[in-house]
Image (cartoon, rainbow, N blue to C red):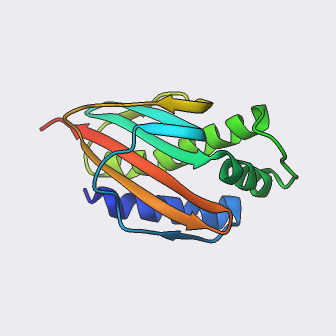
Amino acid sequence: MNLMENIVDATNEIFETMIMMDITPRDPLNESVTEFKGSVSGVIGLAGSCKGMLAIHLPDSVAMAITGNFLGMEVTEVDDDVTDAIGELANMLAGNIKMVLDSGGNSVTLSIPSCIHGDEYSMDCVSDADWVVVPFDSASGQFLVELQLKCNG
């Protein structure tokens, strides 16, 4: 499975059809990002024959802009609408990745979305997993989509 290609395809499709926002993928990062400041992260756990997580990490301003597009309203602060929207965005991205994994003969289940928001926080996941972190540019700023995955076999 080409993690980068699947992240780019899933993210482009969701932003085109659901968010109505143009985005441009960049080259994947050489190392994982674990420290975040003034950001919102939507996280979905993956379990079954493939384990890991999918996360989308956005600076507050980008999270508010995406939520505004997604919900069709003006958003001026990171509130429950923003954390719910970013959690749902992570859920849609993970659902797309799940379809790819399941069609490849895996059996994957997804956790309910979690959303982390704060002035400063860190997060880490499966240490020996395959991973990719893809930056995306939007008119509102850059955000990251991260997939960490370890499949049996």
Q: Residue furthest right?
A: 74
Query: Which residue is nearer to you in this view: 99 or 44?
Result: 44
Residue at 43% across, 68% down: 26
- Left or right of 132? Residue 16 is right
Q: Residue 105 placed where, x, y %? A: 25, 46
Q: Is 135 left, or right, of 105 in this rendering?
A: right
Question: Where on the picture, by quarter, is residue 27?
Answer: bottom left
Relative depth, front residue between 78 and 108: 78
- Where residue 78 appears, x then y in whole percent? 75, 38
Q: Position of residue 1 (x, y in %)?
A: 25, 56
The C terminus lies in which quarter of the figure? top left
29 vs 9, nearest the viewer: 29
Residue drawn at 25 percent across, 33 percent down: 49
- Tell me where residue 7 appears, x and y as whole percent: 41, 57
Residue at point 41% right, 47% down? 146
Label count reads 0
Residue lying at 39% horizontally and 36% vertically, measured from the top left: 53
Left or right: residue 21 versus residue 49 is right
| 89 is higher (above) or lower (below) than 9 | above
Q: Quadrant of residue 124?
A: top left
Residue 119, quarter of picture: top right
Furthest-left residue in view? 153
Q: From what the image shows, is residue 142 above or below residue 102?
A: below
